Amino acid sequence: MVSSAEMMAECWVWYGVAMSAVAVRFVSQYMVRKRNFIKDVPVDDFLMFILTFIYTAAIVSLFMYFDIIEHIPLDNNFTPEENYVMGRKLGILNILAETSIQTTLWGNKGCLLLLYNRLTLFGHQAMIWKVVSAYIILAYMAVIIALYGGWCRPFSDYLVLQPGNMECLTWTHYNILQLTLNLSTDLILLIIPVIMISRLRMKIGKKLLLVCLFSLGIFVMLAAILTKVNVFENNVEPVWFLWCVREVSTAMLVGNLALCMPIARTVWFAVFPRTASTHNTTGAKSATSAAGLAAASKRSTATTEATGGTASSEGGESSRWGASPARSSHHDTGLDMETYGKVGLRNKTRRVSVGEESV
Protein backbone atom coordinates (compact mmCIF):
# COMPACT_ATOMS: atom_id res chain seq x y z
CA MET A 1 0.00 0.00 0.00
CA VAL A 2 1.46 3.35 -1.04
CA SER A 3 1.67 5.92 1.76
CA SER A 4 -0.14 9.22 1.49
CA ALA A 5 3.16 11.12 1.33
CA GLU A 6 4.30 9.03 -1.65
CA MET A 7 0.95 9.55 -3.36
CA MET A 8 1.16 13.30 -2.90
CA ALA A 9 4.73 13.34 -4.20
CA GLU A 10 3.77 11.34 -7.30
CA CYS A 11 0.82 13.67 -7.88
CA TRP A 12 3.03 16.75 -8.08
CA VAL A 13 5.70 14.95 -10.11
CA TRP A 14 3.07 14.15 -12.74
CA TYR A 15 1.91 17.75 -12.66
CA GLY A 16 5.46 19.03 -13.12
CA VAL A 17 6.14 16.70 -16.05
CA ALA A 18 2.88 17.64 -17.80
CA MET A 19 3.44 21.37 -17.35
CA SER A 20 7.01 20.98 -18.61
CA ALA A 21 5.63 19.39 -21.79
CA VAL A 22 3.29 22.35 -22.22
CA ALA A 23 6.18 24.79 -21.80
CA VAL A 24 8.35 22.90 -24.30
CA ARG A 25 5.43 22.89 -26.76
CA PHE A 26 5.12 26.67 -26.72
CA VAL A 27 8.90 27.18 -26.90
CA SER A 28 9.02 24.85 -29.90
CA GLN A 29 6.17 26.67 -31.60
CA TYR A 30 7.95 29.97 -30.98
CA MET A 31 11.00 28.52 -32.74
CA VAL A 32 8.78 27.73 -35.73
CA ARG A 33 6.82 30.98 -35.97
CA LYS A 34 9.38 33.42 -34.48
CA ARG A 35 8.00 36.96 -34.82
CA ASN A 36 4.56 35.69 -35.81
CA PHE A 37 4.23 33.62 -32.62
CA ILE A 38 1.42 35.81 -31.25
CA LYS A 39 -0.02 36.97 -34.56
CA ASP A 40 -0.34 33.51 -36.12
CA VAL A 41 -1.19 31.53 -32.99
CA PRO A 42 -3.35 28.56 -34.07
CA VAL A 43 -6.57 27.61 -32.33
CA ASP A 44 -5.12 24.43 -30.81
CA ASP A 45 -2.32 26.39 -29.11
CA PHE A 46 -4.85 28.84 -27.67
CA LEU A 47 -7.03 25.95 -26.48
CA MET A 48 -4.04 24.26 -24.85
CA PHE A 49 -3.21 27.49 -23.02
CA ILE A 50 -6.71 27.46 -21.50
CA LEU A 51 -6.46 23.75 -20.71
CA THR A 52 -3.37 24.32 -18.57
CA PHE A 53 -5.53 26.26 -16.08
CA ILE A 54 -8.30 23.64 -16.17
CA TYR A 55 -5.72 20.88 -15.67
CA THR A 56 -4.27 22.79 -12.72
CA ALA A 57 -7.76 23.08 -11.22
CA ALA A 58 -8.21 19.31 -11.59
CA ILE A 59 -4.93 18.49 -9.82
CA VAL A 60 -5.51 21.00 -7.02
CA SER A 61 -9.08 19.77 -6.46
CA LEU A 62 -7.96 16.14 -6.33
CA PHE A 63 -5.16 17.05 -3.93
CA MET A 64 -7.49 18.96 -1.59
CA TYR A 65 -10.12 16.20 -1.71
CA PHE A 66 -7.65 13.46 -0.85
CA ASP A 67 -6.05 15.59 1.88
CA ILE A 68 -9.44 16.02 3.58
CA ILE A 69 -10.27 12.32 3.25
CA GLU A 70 -6.94 11.40 4.87
CA HIS A 71 -7.62 13.51 7.96
CA ILE A 72 -11.29 12.70 8.54
CA PRO A 73 -12.35 9.52 10.39
CA LEU A 74 -15.20 8.60 8.08
CA ASP A 75 -16.10 5.54 10.16
CA ASN A 76 -17.25 7.72 13.07
CA ASN A 77 -20.70 9.14 13.48
CA PHE A 78 -21.01 12.82 12.61
CA THR A 79 -23.47 15.33 13.89
CA PRO A 80 -25.87 16.75 11.30
CA GLU A 81 -23.86 19.98 11.23
CA GLU A 82 -20.56 18.14 10.67
CA ASN A 83 -22.15 15.91 8.05
CA TYR A 84 -23.43 18.98 6.21
CA VAL A 85 -20.14 20.91 6.31
CA MET A 86 -17.86 18.02 5.39
CA GLY A 87 -20.23 16.57 2.83
CA ARG A 88 -20.67 19.90 1.12
CA LYS A 89 -16.92 20.57 1.02
CA LEU A 90 -16.05 17.10 -0.31
CA GLY A 91 -18.94 17.15 -2.79
CA ILE A 92 -17.93 20.48 -4.29
CA LEU A 93 -14.30 19.38 -4.62
CA ASN A 94 -15.37 16.05 -6.11
CA ILE A 95 -17.60 17.64 -8.76
CA LEU A 96 -15.03 20.33 -9.54
CA ALA A 97 -12.28 17.74 -9.94
CA GLU A 98 -14.38 15.47 -12.17
CA THR A 99 -15.56 18.34 -14.35
CA SER A 100 -12.00 19.62 -14.75
CA ILE A 101 -10.69 16.13 -15.53
CA GLN A 102 -13.28 15.47 -18.23
CA THR A 103 -12.82 18.94 -19.74
CA THR A 104 -9.05 18.39 -19.84
CA LEU A 105 -9.41 14.96 -21.44
CA TRP A 106 -11.83 16.10 -24.13
CA GLY A 107 -10.00 19.38 -24.60
CA ASN A 108 -6.84 17.47 -25.50
CA LYS A 109 -8.84 15.42 -27.98
CA GLY A 110 -9.97 18.68 -29.54
CA CYS A 111 -6.38 19.94 -29.70
CA LEU A 112 -5.33 16.79 -31.55
CA LEU A 113 -8.22 17.11 -34.00
CA LEU A 114 -7.31 20.73 -34.73
CA LEU A 115 -3.69 19.71 -35.18
CA TYR A 116 -4.64 16.94 -37.62
CA ASN A 117 -6.65 19.44 -39.63
CA ARG A 118 -3.82 22.00 -39.54
CA LEU A 119 -1.37 19.39 -40.82
CA THR A 120 -3.84 18.53 -43.62
CA LEU A 121 -3.88 14.86 -42.62
CA PHE A 122 -7.51 14.64 -43.70
CA GLY A 123 -6.89 16.16 -47.12
CA HIS A 124 -10.06 16.02 -49.20
CA GLN A 125 -11.79 13.93 -46.53
CA ALA A 126 -12.98 17.05 -44.68
CA MET A 127 -16.34 15.43 -44.00
CA ILE A 128 -14.61 12.74 -41.92
CA TRP A 129 -13.01 15.45 -39.79
CA LYS A 130 -16.41 17.10 -39.27
CA VAL A 131 -18.07 13.81 -38.30
CA VAL A 132 -15.31 12.90 -35.84
CA SER A 133 -15.39 16.41 -34.36
CA ALA A 134 -19.16 16.24 -33.93
CA TYR A 135 -18.91 12.83 -32.24
CA ILE A 136 -16.26 14.05 -29.79
CA ILE A 137 -18.28 17.17 -28.93
CA LEU A 138 -21.46 15.13 -28.40
CA ALA A 139 -19.55 12.59 -26.30
CA TYR A 140 -18.24 15.34 -24.02
CA MET A 141 -21.72 16.82 -23.67
CA ALA A 142 -23.13 13.38 -22.82
CA VAL A 143 -20.53 12.86 -20.09
CA ILE A 144 -21.14 16.27 -18.50
CA ILE A 145 -24.93 15.86 -18.67
CA ALA A 146 -24.64 12.40 -17.09
CA LEU A 147 -22.45 13.83 -14.33
CA TYR A 148 -24.80 16.67 -13.40
CA GLY A 149 -28.19 15.28 -14.31
CA GLY A 150 -27.78 11.56 -14.85
CA TRP A 151 -28.12 8.80 -12.28
CA CYS A 152 -27.39 10.84 -9.15
CA ARG A 153 -30.72 12.40 -8.25
CA PRO A 154 -31.30 14.62 -6.45
CA PHE A 155 -28.08 16.48 -7.16
CA SER A 156 -27.84 17.48 -3.49
CA ASP A 157 -26.89 13.87 -2.67
CA TYR A 158 -23.46 14.67 -4.06
CA LEU A 159 -23.02 17.06 -1.13
CA VAL A 160 -23.58 14.65 1.78
CA LEU A 161 -21.34 11.98 3.26
CA GLN A 162 -24.06 9.33 3.32
CA PRO A 163 -26.35 9.87 0.30
CA GLY A 164 -29.71 8.20 -0.01
CA ASN A 165 -28.92 7.30 -3.62
CA MET A 166 -25.78 5.13 -3.63
CA GLU A 167 -25.17 6.04 -7.28
CA CYS A 168 -24.05 9.43 -5.95
CA LEU A 169 -21.30 7.63 -4.03
CA THR A 170 -20.30 4.79 -6.37
CA TRP A 171 -20.91 6.52 -9.73
CA THR A 172 -21.17 3.06 -11.34
CA HIS A 173 -23.39 3.87 -14.32
CA TYR A 174 -21.64 7.18 -14.93
CA ASN A 175 -18.23 5.49 -14.96
CA ILE A 176 -19.43 2.90 -17.48
CA LEU A 177 -20.73 5.61 -19.81
CA GLN A 178 -17.61 7.75 -19.41
CA LEU A 179 -15.25 4.84 -20.05
CA THR A 180 -17.15 3.78 -23.18
CA LEU A 181 -17.17 7.24 -24.74
CA ASN A 182 -13.62 8.00 -23.64
CA LEU A 183 -12.13 4.84 -25.13
CA SER A 184 -14.13 5.10 -28.35
CA THR A 185 -12.99 8.67 -29.02
CA ASP A 186 -9.39 7.84 -28.10
CA LEU A 187 -9.45 4.88 -30.47
CA ILE A 188 -10.68 7.06 -33.34
CA LEU A 189 -7.97 9.65 -32.67
CA LEU A 190 -5.42 6.83 -32.61
CA ILE A 191 -6.47 5.22 -35.89
CA ILE A 192 -6.75 8.41 -37.95
CA PRO A 193 -3.09 9.57 -37.85
CA VAL A 194 -1.71 6.05 -38.21
CA ILE A 195 -3.69 5.48 -41.42
CA MET A 196 -3.07 8.94 -42.86
CA ILE A 197 0.65 9.07 -42.05
CA SER A 198 1.21 5.58 -43.44
CA ARG A 199 -0.01 6.87 -46.82
CA LEU A 200 2.27 9.92 -46.88
CA ARG A 201 5.20 10.02 -49.28
CA MET A 202 8.09 10.50 -46.89
CA LYS A 203 11.03 8.59 -45.49
CA ILE A 204 10.19 5.54 -43.42
CA GLY A 205 12.10 6.92 -40.43
CA LYS A 206 9.95 10.03 -40.29
CA LYS A 207 6.82 7.95 -40.75
CA LEU A 208 7.70 5.74 -37.79
CA LEU A 209 8.55 8.75 -35.62
CA LEU A 210 5.26 10.50 -36.42
CA VAL A 211 3.24 7.32 -35.91
CA CYS A 212 4.91 6.80 -32.52
CA LEU A 213 4.22 10.40 -31.48
CA PHE A 214 0.56 10.28 -32.44
CA SER A 215 0.13 6.77 -31.00
CA LEU A 216 0.90 7.85 -27.45
CA GLY A 217 -2.86 7.87 -26.94
CA ILE A 218 -2.49 4.16 -26.16
CA PHE A 219 -1.11 5.13 -22.74
CA VAL A 220 -4.11 7.40 -22.12
CA MET A 221 -6.45 4.52 -22.91
CA LEU A 222 -4.48 2.21 -20.61
CA ALA A 223 -4.60 4.74 -17.77
CA ALA A 224 -8.35 5.22 -18.30
CA ILE A 225 -8.98 1.48 -18.10
CA LEU A 226 -6.86 1.06 -14.96
CA THR A 227 -8.60 4.03 -13.34
CA LYS A 228 -12.02 2.49 -13.81
CA VAL A 229 -10.79 -0.97 -12.75
CA ASN A 230 -9.63 0.47 -9.43
CA VAL A 231 -12.91 2.35 -9.03
CA PHE A 232 -15.05 -0.73 -9.73
CA GLU A 233 -13.00 -2.90 -7.38
CA ASN A 234 -13.28 -0.44 -4.49
CA ASN A 235 -15.81 2.28 -5.24
CA VAL A 236 -16.11 3.71 -1.73
CA GLU A 237 -12.42 4.40 -1.09
CA PRO A 238 -10.26 7.06 -2.83
CA VAL A 239 -8.05 4.46 -4.52
CA TRP A 240 -8.80 6.23 -7.80
CA PHE A 241 -6.88 9.34 -6.73
CA LEU A 242 -3.52 8.48 -8.26
CA TRP A 243 -5.01 6.87 -11.36
CA CYS A 244 -7.04 10.00 -12.08
CA VAL A 245 -3.85 12.04 -11.80
CA ARG A 246 -2.01 9.63 -14.10
CA GLU A 247 -4.78 9.58 -16.68
CA VAL A 248 -5.28 13.33 -17.00
CA SER A 249 -1.52 13.99 -16.88
CA THR A 250 -0.86 11.42 -19.60
CA ALA A 251 -3.52 13.10 -21.73
CA MET A 252 -1.69 16.42 -21.33
CA LEU A 253 1.58 14.77 -22.37
CA VAL A 254 0.01 13.20 -25.46
CA GLY A 255 -1.57 16.50 -26.45
CA ASN A 256 1.78 18.32 -26.34
CA LEU A 257 4.64 15.95 -27.17
CA ALA A 258 3.82 15.83 -30.88
CA LEU A 259 4.63 19.55 -31.14
CA CYS A 260 7.85 19.42 -29.12
CA MET A 261 9.99 18.20 -32.02
CA PRO A 262 11.64 21.53 -32.99
CA ILE A 263 13.31 21.95 -29.60
CA ALA A 264 14.05 18.22 -29.46
CA ARG A 265 15.88 18.51 -32.79
CA THR A 266 17.83 21.52 -31.52
CA VAL A 267 18.94 19.65 -28.41
CA TRP A 268 19.79 16.54 -30.45
CA PHE A 269 21.96 18.45 -32.91
CA ALA A 270 23.65 20.29 -30.02
CA VAL A 271 24.60 16.99 -28.38
CA PHE A 272 25.46 15.24 -31.67
CA PRO A 273 26.85 17.94 -34.00
CA ARG A 274 28.01 15.37 -36.57
CA THR A 275 24.40 14.38 -37.10
CA ALA A 276 23.55 18.01 -37.75
CA SER A 277 26.29 18.40 -40.37
CA THR A 278 25.21 15.21 -42.12
CA HIS A 279 21.59 16.38 -42.04
CA ASN A 280 22.49 19.77 -43.50
CA THR A 281 24.54 18.17 -46.28
CA THR A 282 21.68 15.85 -47.17
CA GLY A 283 19.23 18.72 -47.06
CA ALA A 284 21.41 20.82 -49.35
CA LYS A 285 21.66 17.98 -51.86
CA SER A 286 17.90 17.47 -51.72
CA ALA A 287 17.29 21.18 -52.24
CA THR A 288 19.69 21.26 -55.20
CA SER A 289 18.04 18.22 -56.73
CA ALA A 290 14.58 19.71 -56.19
CA ALA A 291 15.68 22.99 -57.79
CA GLY A 292 17.02 21.12 -60.81
CA LEU A 293 13.79 19.18 -61.17
CA ALA A 294 11.76 22.36 -60.88
CA ALA A 295 13.86 24.07 -63.57
CA ALA A 296 13.50 21.06 -65.85
CA SER A 297 9.75 21.09 -65.23
CA LYS A 298 9.55 24.76 -66.23
CA ARG A 299 11.50 24.13 -69.44
CA SER A 300 9.28 21.17 -70.26
CA THR A 301 6.15 23.21 -69.62
CA ALA A 302 7.40 26.07 -71.78
CA THR A 303 8.19 23.65 -74.62
CA THR A 304 4.77 22.06 -74.35
CA GLU A 305 2.99 25.40 -74.42
CA ALA A 306 5.08 26.55 -77.40
CA THR A 307 4.12 23.47 -79.39
CA GLY A 308 0.46 23.73 -78.37
CA GLY A 309 0.49 20.30 -76.72
CA THR A 310 -1.16 19.17 -73.51
CA ALA A 311 0.72 18.52 -70.28
CA SER A 312 0.54 14.89 -69.23
CA SER A 313 2.64 12.33 -67.44
CA GLU A 314 5.00 10.12 -69.39
CA GLY A 315 3.44 6.97 -68.05
CA GLY A 316 -0.05 8.01 -69.09
CA GLU A 317 -0.89 9.34 -65.63
CA SER A 318 -3.18 12.37 -65.58
CA SER A 319 -1.45 15.57 -64.56
CA ARG A 320 -4.34 16.24 -62.22
CA TRP A 321 -3.29 13.37 -59.98
CA GLY A 322 0.40 13.11 -60.82
CA ALA A 323 2.60 15.10 -58.45
CA SER A 324 4.80 17.70 -60.12
CA PRO A 325 8.54 17.74 -59.32
CA ALA A 326 8.13 20.96 -57.39
CA ARG A 327 5.46 19.43 -55.19
CA SER A 328 7.38 16.18 -54.88
CA SER A 329 10.16 18.09 -53.17
CA HIS A 330 7.76 18.73 -50.30
CA HIS A 331 6.75 15.10 -49.76
CA ASP A 332 9.39 14.62 -47.08
CA THR A 333 8.70 17.99 -45.44
CA GLY A 334 4.92 18.17 -45.51
CA LEU A 335 4.62 17.89 -41.75
CA ASP A 336 7.94 19.51 -40.90
CA MET A 337 6.58 23.02 -40.44
CA GLU A 338 4.92 22.02 -37.16
CA THR A 339 6.52 18.79 -35.98
CA TYR A 340 10.12 19.31 -37.08
CA GLY A 341 10.35 23.09 -37.17
CA LYS A 342 12.16 23.26 -40.52
CA VAL A 343 9.74 25.53 -42.35
CA GLY A 344 8.30 28.86 -41.25
CA LEU A 345 4.61 29.61 -41.38
CA ARG A 346 4.68 33.20 -42.64
CA ASN A 347 2.48 33.61 -45.70
CA LYS A 348 3.04 29.99 -46.68
CA THR A 349 0.62 27.15 -47.24
CA ARG A 350 1.91 23.64 -47.79
CA ARG A 351 0.10 20.44 -48.61
CA VAL A 352 1.08 16.83 -48.33
CA SER A 353 0.35 13.98 -50.70
CA VAL A 354 -1.66 11.00 -49.57
CA GLY A 355 -1.12 7.97 -51.76
CA GLU A 356 -1.49 9.14 -55.33
CA GLU A 357 -3.97 11.88 -54.53
CA SER A 358 -2.55 15.37 -54.16
CA VAL A 359 -4.04 17.11 -51.15
Image (cartoon, grey):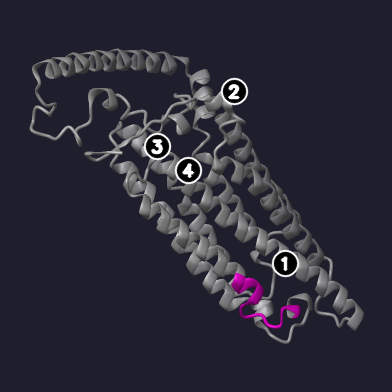
Q: Is residue 225 left or right of residue 9?
A: left
Marks 4, 1: nearer the viewer: 4
Identity of the residue drawn at 52% across and 67% down: 179
Q: Position of residue 339 (x, y in %)?
A: 46, 33
Mark 2 vs mark 3: which is more N-terminal?
2
Marks 2, 3: nearer the viewer: 2
Let me know if residue 355 appears in the view: yes
Q: Quadrant of the N terminus?
A: bottom right
Marks 2, 4: nearer the viewer: 2
The answer to whether residue 151 is magenta is: yes
Marks 1, 2: nearer the viewer: 2
The residue pinned by badge 1 equals 94
Mark 1 vs mark 2: which is more N-terminal?
2
**Relative to 13, residue 64 above or below:** below
Q: Position of residue 68 (x, y in %)?
A: 81, 65
Whether the residues at callouts 1 and 2 have beta carbons within 8 Å, the answer is: no
The residue pinned by badge 2 equals 35
Marks 4, 3: nearer the viewer: 4
Q: Amino acid at mark 4?
A: Leu
The answer to whether residue 136 is magenta is: no
The residue pinned by badge 3 equals 209
Identity of the residue drawn at 47% across and 26% down: 347
Q: Secondary structure at mark 1?
A: helix
